[in-house]
Image (tube, rainbow, N blue to C red):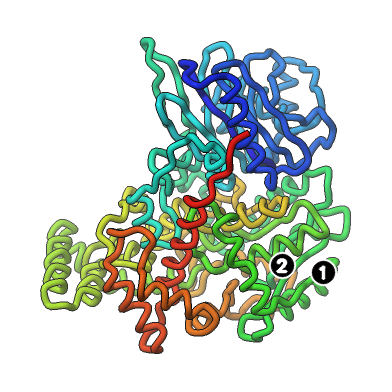
């Protein structure tokens, strides 16, 4: 796992030494992502920088930036290609090659050189972000893995393209103009993360999951072309089951998931696993124990409050699986000590409060191992979230009305209800009714939003583009998998793990597992209101029922109490001062919400945490710019 950065300057607008100094500063700002090695490459048009965390081929043969055998490609790459041995075999069958070493970076370059960026990317099974310069055609390629496990930001200023793994790399260039994006800020305040391909900095964006950004010269003009080499929505059903029965589904998913776990054990360092004791992490640990030649190490953390402490379940699972288990109790003081690090580690404002224990877990795990497998993606792909049940209950009531009146008519009614609510001062209730009447997109947006009708300028969520889902549950899953997963869950894990030099791999996000999961009929994604029937049935081969059929706990922190206790001064500051940026939310509304929470009249912990994180991030990001050089 690594950090990549670079500058594409096709017209020579930046002095060569100034450009090299800038890229060196960008790379240095990413040293936490790659503490083992660094490198740079410059041909006057493209300057690439790199920081390496050595996982495969620990020798100098894995050094980056790397040049392909034929010299046509030069690239930097962050991530892992799990099927790179298979790709090498296929490449050798076509043309015998003299490999320098056994790094997957070399395999990536040769695959892209042989098949081109689109077909080549489609052959990759991995998590990755890469910047590739084609020396012959003079094209720049920026590409990202299918589900968005690895980040890649890019943006243009004065005819020059800047790109990097994290936004802090752009802060390292003092002469770069960085300004807040109002649209992205509104999206963050609504959802608690920056949604879609937006970036909190104006003029910059994220390469989308499964995306390829090509910068090409056509007719004497440089032009950016963005395409998707893979799309989750379009790929639904590509792994169709031959018989939609539970036993068949369990057998097929088990086989594919077992292979996915086996592929993710490929490393030249020790690999372990997160183990919370929940379904997803327990299943990954069980499959690891089955295929690993060594006794695996598993890790969990817990809390002093037994309501949030899953360590007893994790220990029971570890005993049954025979893992070498480590756990740690986190005190409230440990959690609070992480607060000053959040704006630095998470780069963009990010308000999923489970980020705090995730940071502590990664710090704990890194003491023993360099690579850990996790269960991310299990809830989105196999129907595990509780909010799916609530969404389906509401749609069951209002979907027949939508079919009878038509979507257009129902939306007009919904808009009328919302306007009436504003007129009579019942905006919250009016917004809720409007969401119920407004169709699946409006309802899901309402359910996933924290600040709702009070916010006017939030961007349109990506899930509004989802057309013709085969069932209501599939719509909700696709909405989460295309936005919440890459922009919340995977951001949380990537930034927390990379801040400590830990690599986290997710077997559930293997392309074959994704294809099969999204082909399951609705009754095998959720059965009688209970999610993940396929995964739970599979886990019964390894664990007893009492460790499987228990309520989902999650990675919670006592945020409600904090905001009325140790964080109360910050909430009071919101009442008196509001947001650091004016015009996003009315100050009167911010003060009302904060006052209601402090007085115990309502629980607004999510809303307040979103605003607190934004203020802290804004002051940190724009007040401390690292000088280049």
The answer to the question of whether label 2 and label 1 lie on touching residues, with beta carbons closer than 8 A, is yes
User: Image quarter for residue 114?
Assistant: top right
Quick one: 115 or 244, which is closer to the camera?
A: 115
Q: Quadrant of the N terminus?
A: top right
Would you place residue 241 above or below residue 102 in this image? Answer: below
| Residue at point 56%, 33% (across, down) | 122
Q: Callout 2: helix, strand or loop?
A: loop
Residue 165 visible in the snapshot = no
| Residue at point 67%, 14% (across, down) | 71
Q: Callout 1: helix, strand or loop?
A: strand
Would you place residue 113 above or below residue 26 in this image? Answer: above
Task: Find disc 1 in the rendering and name its residue.
Answer: 325
| Residue at point 58%, 43% (across, down) | 626
In terms of sequence position, does the residue under pointer 2 or pointer 1 come before the other? 2
Q: Is residue 519 left or right of residue 456?
A: right
| Residue at point 54%, 54% (across, down) | 517
Question: Residue 409, position in %: x, y?
Answer: 12, 60
Task: Find disc 2 in the rendering and name its residue.
Answer: 275
């Amino acid at each position: 796992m690594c950090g990549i950065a670079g500058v594409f300057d096709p017209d020579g607008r930046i002095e060569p030494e100034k450009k090299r100094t800038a890229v060196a500063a960008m790379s240095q700002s990413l040293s936490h992502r790659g503490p083992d090695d660094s490198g740079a490459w410059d041909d006057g048009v493209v300057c690439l920088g790199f920081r390496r965390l050595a996982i495969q081929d620990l020798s100098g043969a894995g050094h980056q930036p790397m040049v392909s055998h034929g010299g046509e490609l030069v690239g930097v790459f962050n991530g892992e290609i799990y099927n790179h041995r298979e790709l090498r075999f296929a490449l050798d069958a076509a043309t015998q090659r003299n490999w320098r070493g056994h790094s997957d970076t070399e395999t990536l370059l040769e695959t892209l050189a042989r098949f081109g960026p689109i077909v080549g990317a489609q052959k990759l099974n991995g998590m990755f972000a890469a910047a590739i310069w084609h020396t012959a055609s003079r094209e720049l390629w920026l590409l990202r893995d299918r589900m968005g496990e690895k980040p890649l930001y890019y943006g243009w200023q004065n005819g020059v393209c800047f790109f990097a793994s994290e936004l802090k790399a752009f802060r390292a260039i003092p002469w770069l103009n960085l300004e807040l994006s109002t649209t992205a800020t509104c999206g963050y305040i609504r959802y608690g993360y920056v949604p879609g391909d937006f970036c909190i900095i104006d003029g910059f964006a994220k390469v989308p999951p499964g995306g390829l950004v090509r910068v090409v010269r056509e007719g004497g003009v440089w032009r950016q072309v963005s395409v998707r080499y893979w799309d989750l929505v379009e790929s639904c059903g590509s792994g169709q089951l031959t018989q939609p029965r539970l036993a068949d589904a369990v057998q097929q998913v088990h086989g594919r998931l077992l292979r996915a776990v086996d592929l993710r054990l490929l490393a030249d360092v020790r690999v372990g696993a997160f183990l919370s004791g929940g379904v997803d992490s327990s299943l990954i640990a069980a499959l690891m124990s089955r295929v690993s030649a060594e006794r695996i190490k598993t890790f969990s953390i817990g809390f002093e409050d037994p309501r949030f402490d899953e360590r007893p379940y994790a220990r029971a699972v570890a005993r049954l699986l025979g893992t070498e288990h480590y756990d740690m109790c986190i005190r409230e003081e440990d959690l609070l000590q992480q607060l000053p690090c959040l704006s630095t580690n998470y780069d963009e404002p990010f308000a999923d409060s489970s980020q705090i224990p995730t940071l502590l877990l990664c710090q704990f795990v890194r003491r023993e191992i360099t690579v850990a497998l996790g269960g991310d993606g299990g809830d989105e792909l196999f129907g595990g979230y509780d909010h799916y049940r609530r969404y389906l209950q509401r749609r069951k009531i209002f979907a027949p009305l939508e079919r009878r009146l038509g979507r257009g008519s129902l939306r007009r009614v919904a808009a009328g209800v919302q306007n009436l609510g504003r007129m009579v001062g019942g905006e919250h209730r009016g917004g809720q009714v409007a969401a119920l009447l407004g169709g699946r997109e409006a309802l899901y947006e309402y359910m996933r939003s924290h600040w709702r009708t009070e916010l006017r300028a939030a961007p349109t969520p990506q899930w509004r583009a989802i057309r013709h889902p085969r069932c209501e549950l599939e719509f909700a899953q696709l909405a989460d998998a295309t936005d919440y997963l890459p922009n919340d869950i995977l951001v949380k894990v990537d930034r927390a793990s990379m801040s400590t030099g830990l690599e986290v791999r997710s077997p559930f996000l293997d392309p074959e597992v994704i294809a099969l999961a999204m082909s399951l009929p609705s009754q095998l994604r959720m059965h009688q209101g209970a999610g993940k029937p396929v995964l739970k049935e599979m886990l019964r081969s390894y664990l007893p029922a009492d460790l499987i059929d228990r309520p989902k706990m999650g990675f919670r922190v006592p945020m409600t109490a904090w905001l009325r206790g140790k964080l109360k001064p910050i909430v009071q500051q919101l009442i008196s001062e509001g947001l650091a940026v004016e015009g996003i939310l009315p100050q009167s509304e911010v003060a009302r919400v904060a006052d209601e929470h402090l007085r115990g009249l309502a629980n607004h912990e999510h809303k307040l945490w979103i605003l607190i994180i934004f203020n802290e991030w804004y002051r940190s990001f724009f007040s401390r710019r690292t000088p280049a050089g």
